[in-house]
């Protein structure tokens, strides 16, 4: 039986939970992980052949990476490593496990952005996976003085409740554990009350001019309804990838790097259809 912890308003009309069997598509994460390993090894060999002192020029804007639900900073370490090798200065969100109140996580993210912006003297670009992308979008709408642009990956900003039943059971377990006294986890209000409504509203708020927004999504996503990831305010880019694999698939990392590149801002991100669509 499907848990009913999550409020119905988090799944607006037109969106739905992926079918039970959809999670089988997540099996491609093994292939995506393999592609990353091969790409990492080849890149390492290429870097060894590059003369000392000829590293890629440092990209000006700092990049903050925000993990998805149930995940921590380590889940985006492969992407961070790859972006750093391309000249990006990346930062962790300081999230060990994204399992708590979304409003509290958004406040923590805002503080982290303030810290980085003050340190670097410039606005920050934020890359968020799944729930991390929803948090990034909400903070960008609220604090455009801190955020220069965002890239979301498999983030169901239009319908957070349109997720697979396995994820719904995880949410239900967190709520039960919170009720049992394990603080710091999602409470019922975070998924069905005022907190949930406020978080949902923040994730859909209008974005001020000057904030670049790229939304990466996959029709092969077995965890969330891919349609909920296509924000009408974003430059939408389709990939062929599992939900989990977006965190490290080389094709997705290449698209993220392209979206973060100064040359791509305000233009259409080029997609290699042979690899990603």
Image (spheres, helix red, strand yellow):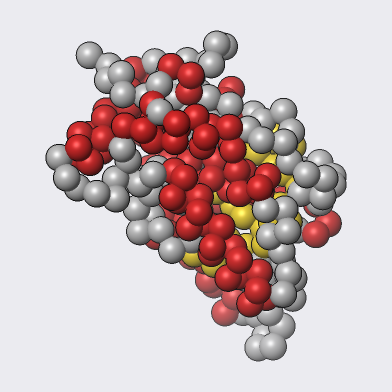
The answer to which of 152 and 182 lies nearer the viewer is 182
Q: Which residue is located at x 49 percent, y 29 percent? A: 197
- Please state, as top left, top right, bottom left or bottom right, where the C terminus lies in the image: top right
Residue 65 image point, x, y percent:
54, 57
Residue under the point 66% across and 30% down: 231
Q: Is residue 72 above or below residue 197?
A: below
Residue 135 visible: yes
Residue 152 in view here? no
* Residue drawn where x is 39% and y is 35% of the image: 190
Which of the two residues, 131 or 154, is positioned nearer the viewer here? 131
| Residue at the extreme left | 180
Residue 87: image quadrant is: bottom right
Q: How many marks?
A: 0
> Where residue 39 appears, x then y in whole percent?
52, 58
Q: Is residue 152 above or below residue 54?
A: above
Locate residue 112 relative to residue 122 in the image: left or right.
left
Image check: 41 left or right of 136?
left
* Left or right: 210 in relation to 1: right
Residue 173 image offset from top left, x and y in percent: 22, 34
Q: Residue at x 48, y 58 (%)?
A: 108
Please tell me whether residue 234 is drawn above or below residue 247 in the rendered image: above
In the displayed orientation, state which residue is furthest to the bottom.
52
Q: Quadrant of the N terminus?
A: top left
Position of residue 30 relative to residue 219, above or below, is: below
Find the residue positioned furthest to the top: 13
* Residue lying at the far front of the rendered structure: 194
Left or right of residue 131: residue 184: left
Q: Position of residue 60 (x, y in %)?
A: 74, 71
């Amino acid at each position: 039986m499907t848990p009913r912890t999550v409020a119905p308003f988090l799944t607006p009309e037109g969106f739905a939970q992926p079918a039970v069997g959809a999670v089988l598509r997540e099996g491609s994460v093994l292939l995506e992980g393999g592609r990353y390993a091969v790409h990492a090894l080849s890149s390492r060999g290429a870097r060894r052949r590059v003369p000392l002192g000829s590293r890629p020029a440092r990209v000006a804007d700092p990049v903050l990476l925000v993990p998805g639900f149930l995940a921590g900073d380590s889940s985006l370490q492969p992407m961070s490593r790859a972006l750093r090798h391309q000249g990006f200065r990346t930062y962790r969100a300081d999230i060990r496990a994204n399992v708590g109140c979304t409003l509290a996580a958004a406040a923590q993210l805002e503080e982290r952005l303030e810290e980085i912006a003050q340190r670097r003297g410039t606005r920050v670009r934020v890359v968020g996976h799944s729930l991390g992308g929803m948090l990034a979008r909400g903070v960008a709408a609220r604090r455009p003085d801190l955020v220069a642009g965002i890239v979301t990956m498999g983030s169901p900003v239009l319908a957070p409740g349109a997720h697979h039943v396995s994820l719904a059971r995880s949410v239900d377990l967190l709520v039960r554990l919170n009720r049992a006294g394990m603080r710091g986890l999602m409470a019922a209000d975070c998924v069905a009350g005022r907190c949930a409504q406020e978080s949902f509203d923040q994730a859909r708020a209008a974005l001020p001019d000057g904030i670049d927004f790229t939304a990466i999504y996959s029709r092969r996503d077995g965890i969330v309804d891919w349609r909920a990831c296509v924000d009408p305010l974003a430059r939408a880019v389709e990939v062929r990838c599992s939900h989990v694999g977006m965190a490290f698939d080389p094709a997705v990392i290449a698209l993220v790097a392209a979206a973060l590149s100064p040359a791509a801002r305000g233009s259409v991100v080029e997609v290699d259809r042979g690899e990603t669509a």
